[in-house]
Amino acid sequence: MSNQKQQKPTLTGQRFKTRKRVECMKFFCFFPQFQESVVQGLNQTGTDLEAVAKFLDFSGAKLDYRRYAETLFDILVAGGMLAPGGALSDDMTRTNFCLFTAPEDVKTMKAYAQVFNKLIRRYKYLEKGFEEEIKKLLLFLNGFSESERNKLAMLTGILLANGNLSASILSSLFNDNLVKEGLSPAFAVKLFKSWISEKDINSVAASLRKVGMDNRLMELFPVNKRSYDHFSKYFTDAGLKELSDFARNQQSLGARKELQKELQEQMSQGVSFKEIIAYGKEEIKKSSISEQMMIGIVWTSVMSLVEWNKKEELVTEQAIKQLKQHSPLLKAFTTQGLSELTLLLRVQEYCYDNIHFMKAFQKIVLLLYKVEVVSEEAILKWYTEAHLAKGKSVFLEQMKKFVEWLKNAEEESESEEETDGD
């Protein structure tokens, strides 16, 4: 019994090795046949890309796309198998009908995008392999000619716009060698032009944010050139002002997040309001941000300090207490009518997004009025024309009686002035 137990691992190992050896033999035996079949089919269909799409659709039933996906995509893009670095393998069968030999124009690139789109929709299991192929091709940019890089960039932009690729493939462009040689930003120009022409900058921005690429575009440049000014000039000069503006907004967003974090830390550490206000005023000057933006940051910082109760009646009491305590901070950054209105809009948005605050809106606004953070003019403007759509009917109803009181008080005041004048 003990001898049998000792032999089992050895036998299993031998079978495993034999099975792997058989699989490898199958791979290399059928590999030339696969490549020959694809190349022959492309030679027969030639430049008729609709015929190419039909050939690929039909051939998937008899050719092993799953096993040879990389080979298939290499041939469709470059005409043959690519060696490390991007050069075509010398000993492999090739075709002259591929992306790299096609005309360098938008119409042709769109047609090629349709070929890949149809292929991947028909054989879903190719999706992951296709993304890996594009990532690899981007790393091989140095091995391609300028025209080949341009075609690949245009195609990639169209595929990104169509949703055939995730923007995560852009990570390959952050490769140190590509960045150092200036290939990354040059490729990005062609890619983003193609992408934005198919969609718009808002769609592009959403795709970048989805995979965390929105804050990494500076990595297209060497470390000593990773500034907004350099980025802006490079892409604006290349005709991509939309991308420059997007990067500026991202930079501003990052700065706002850091500022909010710093303000929260100061508040939680008990730094005096006088010091916090001085810091905030200095940041407005230094970072060239508006008071309206600052009051939004201060509001978010103040409201983020508390762990709010889930019960509506209790959360209102908490909010009033918190805002009353920090009213000097809010007052310091609402010296303009537009800043007051901005604060009211932020309060409305906050109460709508946090359902436990829905009934607290009127009491919060009333407090802000009493401590002279917002004026009756700002409240009336918000009520009559400047409110958001979010929760509009609920909040306007809450404010109805108070607004009527304000209007009556204003009319009485005007009447008294006229009487005094007489």
Image: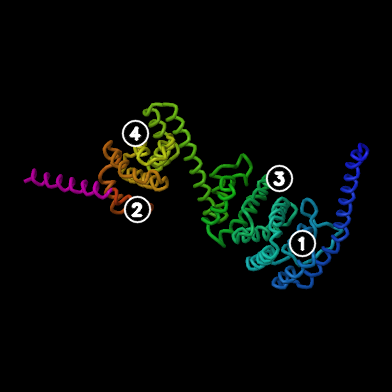
Question: Separation of disc 4 and disc 1 at Cα?
Answer: 66 Å
Quadrant hosting residue 5: top right
Question: Separation of disc 3 and disc 4 at Cα?
Answer: 57 Å
Q: Residue at x 43, y 34 (%)?
A: 305
Q: Is residue 420 magenta?
A: yes
Q: Residue at x 40, y 30 (%)?
A: 276
Left or right: 153, with 23 as reference point: left
State the residue position of label 2.
392
For marks 2 and 3, the one nearer the N-term is 3
Q: The magenta stretch spans which residues?
A: 399-422
Tag shown at residue 177: 3
For marks 4 and 1, the one nearer the N-term is 1
What secondary structure is the magenta-colored segment mainly?
helix
Farthest residue toward the front?
A: 1
Q: Position of residue 338 (x, y in %)?
A: 33, 45
For marks 3 and 1, the one nearer the N-term is 1
| Mark 1 nearby-residue class (10 Å; few <14, some 14–19, many ≥20) | some
Question: Separation of disc 3 and disc 1 at Cα?
Answer: 32 Å
State the residue position of label 1.
65
* Dot 3 amino acid type: Asn
| Mark 2 nearby-residue class (10 Å; few <14, some 14–19, many ≥20) | some
Quadrant hosting residue 81: bottom right
* Dot 1 amino acid type: Tyr
Question: Separation of disc 2 and disc 4 at Cα?
Answer: 25 Å
Farthest residue toward the right?
A: 3
Left or right: 29, with 87 as reference point: right
Q: Position of residue 255 (x, y in %)?
A: 49, 40
Could you say whether the residue bearing mark 1 is in a helix, strand or loop? loop
For marks 2 and 4, the one nearer the N-term is 4
State the residue position of label 4.
321
Question: Separation of disc 2 and disc 3 at Cα?
Answer: 54 Å
